[in-house]
Amino acid sequence: MKNINQNLSLKEIVDLINEKSITEKVDLINEIREIIHNVSPFKNEPVDYVKWVYNEDVIANDYNPNKVAPPEMQLLEVSIINDGYTQPIVTFPDNDKITVIDGFHRNRVGKESLIVKDRIKGFLPTVIIRPEVSDINSRMASTIRHNRARGKHQVSAMSEIVMELKNRNWTNKRISRELGMDEDEILRLCQVSGLENLFKDNDFNKAWVSNDDNVEDFEEFLGEVNEEDFELHKIPNEKIKIEFFIHIKIGN
């Protein structure tokens, strides 16, 4: 231990912590928790190590598609005031700051609610996301997964993230796997942001070309089209009935 004599008994460690100021207490408790976490059978689970950090060191990301209306925000504050923090804020270390991956509004309550801020003494409970979710693309995907798991996200912001991932050369298949979307949903979200990259990585069959060169196999028919044939063969959204040639293939 950096700040605790390893030869101390558990009782002596507790007594030592009780003698410290609030900041020193938090530092020592975080240190002890980290040591226990490193030997825990659940050390691959972020929730196994909840670390209390200064709220001013926690910064919001700029891509969160989850927007909470004022009534829900007030309810979240009431919940934290009455029930306490039951979920830590999911974060990622970013230089000398800590960026929020999930828990943007829990972060806001801890900073903006005077009752909560005073009670938790200017700190926030955090967990650090797994190391493999370290690059910006993976963090964006993680934010969306957390939001979708709760059924909360803003379509316009979600579509912007999907387009951002496509611009970073993520295929529809990878976006589908990482964000838990089907490809139809991905296409719809692309439409929200524009059609420029809508079909960026889609495969299309070549246009059909007839291999029949013998025009004698066809009989040309010219006549007025009845309503049934018109409805069956009309171009989508075509409202004008026209006369057209129907080529009827004879034989095979």
Image (spheres, rainbow, N blue to C red):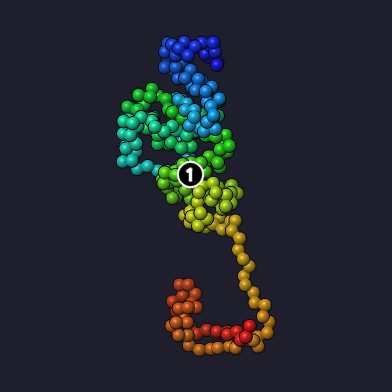
Q: Is residue 175 above or below residue 55?
A: below
Q: Quadrant of the C terminus?
A: bottom right
Q: Which residue is mark 1?
A: 144
Q: Which sits in the foreground, 172 or 34?
A: 34
Q: Position of residue 107 (x, y in %)?
A: 41, 33
Q: Position of residue 240 (x, y in %)?
A: 45, 79
Q: Which sits in the foreground, 166 or 79?
A: 79
At 47% across and 26% down in the image, what residue appears? 51
At 53% across and 27% down in the image, what residue appears? 40
Secondary structure of the residue carrying tag 1 is helix
Q: Is residue 188 above or below residue 161?
A: below
Q: Residue furthest front?
A: 41
Q: Is residue 147 above or below residue 197?
A: above
The image quarter in which residue 220 lies: bottom right
Circle 1 packing at 10 Å, graded few (<14), some (14-19), many (20+), is many
Q: Position of residue 154 (x, y in %)?
A: 42, 47
Residue type for callout 1: Ile
